[in-house]
Image: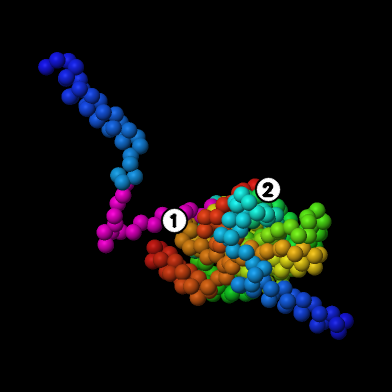
């Protein structure tokens, strides 16, 4: 119990540090757009790990809906989807439901994929929200399920 | 003057001019619209009207947003699972308490909360304004919500004055509310 008391916050803090602005695990919007549009190179599998309501209104074209990974159902969906992906595949996860430091989904999603052995996971950095940092900036969006 | 020369010198240029005028009438060039505002020109801002929705709040009370016309309304999109949103709720409660008698109405629209999570939160914080479990239609009606928290300020004529996206600056929000309440009082 004592071990858990120290271990859980330490793990969370490690993920927090890895995903702090400027860290190499992050990918910026323009960098992602280039990676998705490039004719050569490995194209990323883009997974959305936030609430459905936002995804239905606007999401990155070609991205897959996983659901809020901060909840058990979303985490189960992510685990199931991860089983069909190669561990050295280029994966980008994003949420943008709320300000970066407070997103309840992005860190658990990253931790899960890292723990499972995925080596090329990048996290789309959306400082404020998907609306402010992606849609309002004119990056491509799609609507619907 | 021979007919061929007449055509060449007058008829064809006239026809070309006529064709140009017809095209310009229906497809005016972009420069035709360019208006350079001069200092002192009035600035006209077109505010979007707030939607008129019939909803049920958490207590099962019917809520028609049209009935709030004449009040200053603050619509806060939030979620109990969204930490910064949840942290703001006590400040919305305080704002509602302070300005209710002057005509302020706050409405909370929750996104993606489970019923039990939302009811627990509502009761724990003793929220003093109506809270609605939002859905796709509610979000669309307010122009699309792509991040939390998002807060809209609606004037007493029912037009959306301000949209705050991200953590709310309550000092700024209170100033906007007070200004609109004052304008409302002057109108009466």
Of residues B181 and B45, the one nearer the viewer is B45
* Placement of B31 over or under B23, stated as above or below: below
Residue located 35% across and 37% down the image: B27
Magenta-colored stretch includes residue B31: no
The secondary structure making up most of the magenta span is loop
Q: Residue furthest right?
A: A1
Give the left or right position of residue A4, taking residue A102 as reference: right
Quarter of the figure with the N terminus of chain A? bottom right
Give the left or right position of residue B188, taking residue A139 as reference: left
Magenta-colored stretch includes residue B43: yes
Residue located 58% across and 56% down the image: A34
Mark 2, residue position:
A145
Query: Are discs 1 and 2 both within one chain?
Result: no
Q: Residue furthest left?
A: B1
Of residues A127 and B154, the one nearer the viewer is A127
In this view of the protein, can residue B129 be seen by the observer? no
Q: Residue furthest top?
A: B2
Mark 1, residue position:
B47
Query: Of the residues tagged 1 and 2, which is closer to the observer?
Result: 2
Of residues B107 and B101, the one nearer the viewer is B107
Q: Which residues are magenta?
A: B33-51
What element does badge 1 sit on? loop
């Amino acid at each position: 119990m004592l071990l858990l008391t120290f271990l859980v916050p330490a793990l969370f803090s490690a993920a927090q540090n890895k995903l702090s602005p400027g860290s190499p695990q992050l990918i910026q919007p323009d960098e992602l757009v280039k990676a998705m549009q490039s004719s050569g190179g490995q194209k990323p599998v883009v997974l959305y790990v936030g609430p459905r309501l936002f995804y239905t209104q606007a999401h990155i074209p070609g991205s897959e809906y996983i659901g809020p990974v901060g909840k058990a159902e979303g985490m189960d969906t992510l685990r199931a989807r991860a089983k069909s992906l190669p561990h050295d595949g280029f994966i980008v996860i994003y949420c943008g439901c709320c300000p970066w430091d407070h997103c309840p989904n992005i860190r658990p999603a990253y931790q899960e994929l890292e723990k499972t052995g995925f080596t090329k996971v990048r996290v789309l950095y959306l400082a404020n929200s998907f609306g402010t940092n992606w849609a309002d900036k004119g990056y491509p969006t799609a609507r619907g399920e | 003057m021979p007919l061929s020369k007449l055509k060449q010198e007058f008829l064809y240029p006239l026809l070309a001019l006529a064709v140009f005028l017809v095209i310009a009438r229906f497809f005016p060039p972009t420069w035709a619209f360019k208006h350079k505002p001069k200092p002192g020109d009035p600035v006209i801002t077109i505010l979007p009207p707030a939607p008129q929705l019939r909803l049920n709040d958490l207590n099962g009370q019917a809520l028609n947003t049209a009935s709030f016309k004449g009040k200053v309304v603050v619509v806060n999109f939030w979620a109990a699972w969204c930490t910064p949103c949840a942290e703001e709720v006590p400040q919305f409660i305080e704002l509602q308490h302070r300005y209710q008698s002057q005509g302020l109405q706050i409405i909370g629209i929750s996104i993606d909360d489970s019923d039990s999570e939302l009811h627990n939160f509502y009761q724990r914080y003793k929220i003093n304004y109506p809270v609605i479990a939002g859905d796709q239609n509610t979000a669309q009606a307010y122009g699309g919500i792509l991040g939390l928290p998002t807060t809209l300020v609606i004037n007493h004529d029912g037009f959306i004055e301000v949209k705050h996206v991200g953590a709310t600056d309550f000092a700024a929000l209170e100033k906007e509310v007070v200004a609109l309440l004052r304008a409302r009082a002057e109108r009466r």
